[in-house]
């Protein structure tokens, strides 16, 4: 009986096995690999902040918003991208039990082409756990130092040597907020709650060599400024809640007022700036883009933009007003015809082209899905 | 702003400045918190404030009225609240949910109670040590809110920053004084 069963089983395998073996001969198994690098070309990087887990930096192609991948971040962090677009830095918080327990804060160093963390620098555990704002985490003009905004809630700035990979110094900046590095050397300025600016001079080693205080620049109570700032021909530019554009110089080591002007003068509808990183300057084109909303009042300063205004800083005129939807933060390329990217609270990444012949009027040119609290973006060459 | 409001902010600024200097000298964050945490804004600040301690509760806790309103972002106390409502997350207007920690520091808003027409100082304490309570409404209002250079009025930062457990969970709205 057993013998007969074995004969039957062999016959069955012979019939069924022949085509299976033939298929196996034709089949080449796929190999699992890791892609070496992203496609080359200019990118737009979006910091996707998270408050209950890992954040990330999303990389999109500048020209088509093709999604190229993610770089890993921690919680409640910040991002700054080096001018060449190949190196980026993240300031991250990591808690042992994600939302409780011991925690550490670090700078993560990213190689953008390979989407990889290639280094880490330990920080004093004081970095501000705040929504993404460009002035919270900056790079010196020569890339030698990173400046980290601390808030415990006492304000201070940690200076990080990027070459040595160490925190050099913590500089107390009581009552002041935001970091605005000088265009040369290693100084930085900060906005103070008295309506003034303080400027800290730093040595080549990153240690403080002097401090200056400006005269009163703005009225903290009646027309406070946003911390979102831009560089315009070497000057610092800020806008206020009521729409005053302040142009300041830090060239001689102390912040001084150069000019101020209401960008909303003569405009009906109580328009005012609003959002988070709400201004962006396209240097070649010489145009400042500002997120604006109508019917402004107390508490509307974070309203996302209903229009983006293209403003000629030199001429002091609004060149164009482009309707948009819910854009809370901006960044812009430095092309002759700037490409502007907006982040909405949905959240979504918007791409706009601009027309220099029509006052840099914006035209919608694509969207991409993003995640988390996304309010910082950067365009690379 | 009112004198009381200014007094709170001045005290806040002094504390943070002194704290920063101490930290710069000692790098002892916990020693800073041990001093400042007992006197900054929030529950610990309340004994320092000389005002009527009913805080409008007779108007705020109307049965069937404020209790339900407290679950909505439009409730008057939430005029400068950026976060998820603890009142809809197992806590209340003045209580953190069980198992969480009350933040040691907070930001302050000035909100008008439509029931009595008075302006109240509202301490927006975060509750800490748990994930964001996305089960409750997320609200974003910014009346009187200011950037971080007026830290005591700033609502974009994690006010669990001074706690041992720093995970943001939700936000309460505690009346700590009259604004006039």
Image (cartoon, helix red, strand yellow):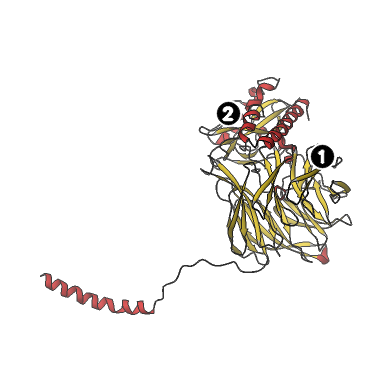
Q: Secondary structure at mark 1?
A: loop
x, y (%) of residue A353? 74, 64
**Residue B5, label in figure:** none
Classify residue A236 as left or right of residue A82: right
Of A252 and A202, nearer the camera is A202
- Measured as percent of width and height from the top left, residue B36 is found at 66, 30
Q: Quadrant of the N terminus of chain A?
A: bottom left
For image coordinates 80% across by 41% down, the residue present is A224
| Mark 2 residue element | loop
The x and y percentages for residue A245 are 84, 49
Decide: is A343 above or below B139: below
Query: Which residue is under mark 2?
Result: B64
Q: Residue at x 63, y 37 (%)?
A: B159
Residue that mark 1 sits on = A195
- Residue B64: x percent and y percent? 58, 28
Label 1 chain ID: A
């Amino acid at each position: 009986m057993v013998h007969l069963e074995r004969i039957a089983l062999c016959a069955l395998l012979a019939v069924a096995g022949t085509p299976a073996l033939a298929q196996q001969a034709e089949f080449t198994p796929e190999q699992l690999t890791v892609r070496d690098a992203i496609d080359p070309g200019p990118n737009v990087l979006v910091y996707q902040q998270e408050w209950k887990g890992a954040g990330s930096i999303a990389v999109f192609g500048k020209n088509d918003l093709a999604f190229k991948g993610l770089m890993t971040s921690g919680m409640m962090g910040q991002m700054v991208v080096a001018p060449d677009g190949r190196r980026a830095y993240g300031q991250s918080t990591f808690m042992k039990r994600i939302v409780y327990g011991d925690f550490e804060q670090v700078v993560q160093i990213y190689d953008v082409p390979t989407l990889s963390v290639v280094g880490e620098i330990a920080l004093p555990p004081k970095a501000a756990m705040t929504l993404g704002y460009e002035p919270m985490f900056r790079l010196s003009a020569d890339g030698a130092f990173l400046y980290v905004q601390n808030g415990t809630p006492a304000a201070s700035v940690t200076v990080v040597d990027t070459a040595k990979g160490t925190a050099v110094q913590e500089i107390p900046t009581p009552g002041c907020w935001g970091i605005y590095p000088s265009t040369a050397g290693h100084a930085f300025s900060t906005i103070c709650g008295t309506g003034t600016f303080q400027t800290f001079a730093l040595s080549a080693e990153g240690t403080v060599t002097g401090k200056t205080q400006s005269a009163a620049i703005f009225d903290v109570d009646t027309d406070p400024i946003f911390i979102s700032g831009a560089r315009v021909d070497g000057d610092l530019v800020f806008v206020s809640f009521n729409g005053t554009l302040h142009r300041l110089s830090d060239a001689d080591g102390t912040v001084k007022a150069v000019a101020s002007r209401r960008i909303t003068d003569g405009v009906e509808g109580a328009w005012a700036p609003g959002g988070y990183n709400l201004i962006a300057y396209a240097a070649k084109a010489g145009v400042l883009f500002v997120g604006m909303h109508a019917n402004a009042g107390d508490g509307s300063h974070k309203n996302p933009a209903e229009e983006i205004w293209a403003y000629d800083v030199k001429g002091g005129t609004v060149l164009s007003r482009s309707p948009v939807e819910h854009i809370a933060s901006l960044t812009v390329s430095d092309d002759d015809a700037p490409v502007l990217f907006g982040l909405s609270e949905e959240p979504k990444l918007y791409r706009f082209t601009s027309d220099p012949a029509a006052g840099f009027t914006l035209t919608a040119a694509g969207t991409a899905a993003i995640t988390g609290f996304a309010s910082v973006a950067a365009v690379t060459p | 702003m009112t004198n009381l409001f200014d007094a709170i902010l001045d005290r806040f600024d002094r504390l943070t400045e002194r704290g920063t200097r101490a930290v710069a000298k000692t790098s002892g964050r916990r020693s800073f918190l041990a001093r400042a945490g007992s006197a900054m804004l929030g529950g610990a600040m309340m004994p320092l404030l000389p005002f009527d301690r009913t805080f409008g509760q007779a108007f705020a806790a109307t049965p069937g009225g404020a209790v339900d309103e407290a679950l909505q972002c439009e409730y008057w106390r939430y005029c400068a609240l950026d976060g998820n409502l603890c009142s809809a997350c197992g806590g209340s207007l003045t209580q953190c949910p069980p198992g969480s920690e009350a933040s040691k520091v907070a930001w302050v808003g000035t909100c008008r109670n439509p029931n009595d027409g008075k302006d109240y100082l509202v301490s927006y304490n975060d509750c800490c040590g748990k994930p964001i309570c996305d089960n409750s409404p997320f609200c974003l209002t910014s009346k009187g809110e200011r950037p971080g250079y007026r830290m005591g009025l700033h609502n974009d930062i994690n006010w669990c920053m001074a706690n041992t457990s720093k995970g943001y969970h939700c936000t309460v709205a505690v009346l700590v004084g009259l604004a006039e």
